[in-house]
Amino acid sequence: MTRDWSALPSVNSLWEATAEPARAFPVLSGEQQADVVIIGAGYTGLSAAHHIAKSGLAPVVLEANRPGWGASGRNGGVITAKFRLSFREIDAVHGRAMAKRMYEIAHESTDMVEELVSEFGITSANLTRTGQVKAAHNETTLKAAIDEASWMTREMGDAEVRVLDKHGVRDETGSDIFVGGVLNPGSGGIHPLNYLRGLADGVARRGVSIFQESPVIKLRRENGGIVAETPRGAVRAKQAIIATNSYSDLTGATAHMQRTLIPFRSAMVATEQLPRNLAGRLMPTGRTYTETKRMMRWFRMVDNRVIFGGRGAFGKQDSQASFDALRKAMVGIFPDLADVPLAYKWSGLVGMTLDSVPHIGRLDDRTLVSMGYNGAGVAMSSLMGRYLVAFVRGESPEVGLLDIGRMKAIPFYPLREPAVRMVAGWYQFLDAIGR
């Protein structure tokens, strides 16, 4: 049975409403030749295409929907030099050398975003590097955040991390509910869909072929190469890159990758534009913010609107219950928003892995993959394009814990959704009782 690709739901996001017009890419028809066929036109796929073309090879990019329809156009636009697994945890389990290498990779990723924005002149991305505040909701989590910051300064040489008291966080956020926090100046924010569309336009202008509404329905080996088949055409290449992340199950050609990920739905809401006096009181420094609860919420101010997001939504589509929960949490932090209407509500999938880090490398002699960004993918997926070209050229870059050899399949995969619900419910309970 042929899937109706036009029936894939649109995204009612702030980013979609405020993005630059999308460049129209053709649908693949007939056969194309390439050195590398890239499946997925998100940050990973487009960065890979850019770096591969820059190295003198010819890539072709195939996108099932349109560039930016998946996670690259739905995320919160937060740029952070981190993994879900902390550097202190990495040090404890894998040693100091590994922790330092992962620290280098994380910071390289944020620099890569800045490099790509500059190289392609994507001014509409509105990239900022003003920093991020982790705001603590009780003394226990504040102590843990301060201990982590002190360790980072002492062991990783991260002298820029700063501790804020209650008054400092109140000045930063405009909220009185936090007891203190930690400021990481290296983080930032971006308009994620404009960034994506700028990449797509820039890569296309440099001669890379991108095809939209061209899902890869079959990937097969032939005559020492690989063939990516779409409903109306095919690309014959020497190698293939799978860059589909949590949307790998859109087709059978990449669905096997889904067994390495736990898709976790992340929801976001955005208010109507606030009155100037209210907008001036909330998040006046223009940073991004997270809180220390297990079911983490994050927030930022964009164009005099509060964007508020978090994980914990379930199911395959948007959930009104999750949007209601976000609004309640937002008003709990910012009571002045109680009567401000929401203008946009949307959600998307985060690709979580068992070991809390992404993975990159070769599946076999013809197929490469990079995915599993665990909610910190804007920067990391941008960087992975640079590493993918090294693998394509037969090199073995030092990727630390990101080595695909460490990637594990999800055990009892059919039970993943009830397991996620159970763990999330437990975290919500611990947050509710202040643990």
Image (cartoon, rainbow, N blue to C red):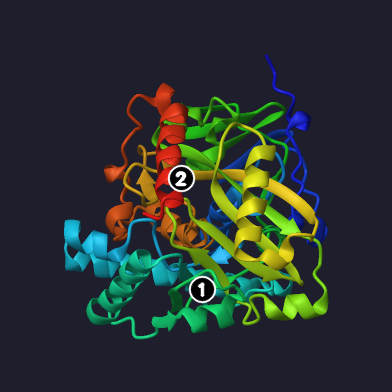
Q: Nearer the viewer, residue 85 or 174?
A: 174
Q: Is residue 176 above or below residue 435?
A: below
- In the rendered view, tell whether residue 320 sits above or below residue 378: above
Q: Residue 187: x and y, percent?
A: 50, 73
Q: Residue furthest bottom?
A: 159
Can see residue 291? yes
Badge 1 marks a residue whose secondary structure is strand
Look at mark 1 in the image and give the residue it sits on. 132
The residue sitting at 83% across, 74% down in the picture is: 275
Label 1: few (<14), some or many (≥20) within 10 Å?
many
The percent coordinates of residue 332 (x first, y second) are: 61, 60
User: Residue 354 in the image: x percent, y percent?
Assistant: 34, 41
Q: For marks 1 and 2, give the CA distance.
A: 24 Å
> In the shown orientation, is residue 226 left or right of residue 357?
right
Residue annotated with mark 2: 428
Question: Looking at the figure, which quarter contains the N terminus?
Answer: top right
Mark 2: amino acid: Gln
Q: Evaluate if marks 1 and 2 touch, with contact meaning CB atoms under 8 Å apart.
A: no
Secondary element at tag 2:
helix
Q: Residue at x 73, y 37 (%)?
A: 213
- The foreground one among 360 and 169 is 169
| Residue drawn at (56%, 35%) of the image | 314
Query: Can you tell which mark lies on residue 302?
Result: none
The answer to which of 321 and 408 lies nearer the viewer is 321
Instruction: Indicate the quadrant containing the C terminus: top left, top right, bottom left or bottom right.
Output: bottom left
Residue type at mark 1?
Answer: Gln
Q: Is residue 61 left or right of residue 391?
A: right
Q: Residue at x 38, y 43 (%)?
A: 353
- Mark before the other along the chain sequence, 1 or 2: 1
Q: Residue 30 location in percent, x, y?
A: 72, 32
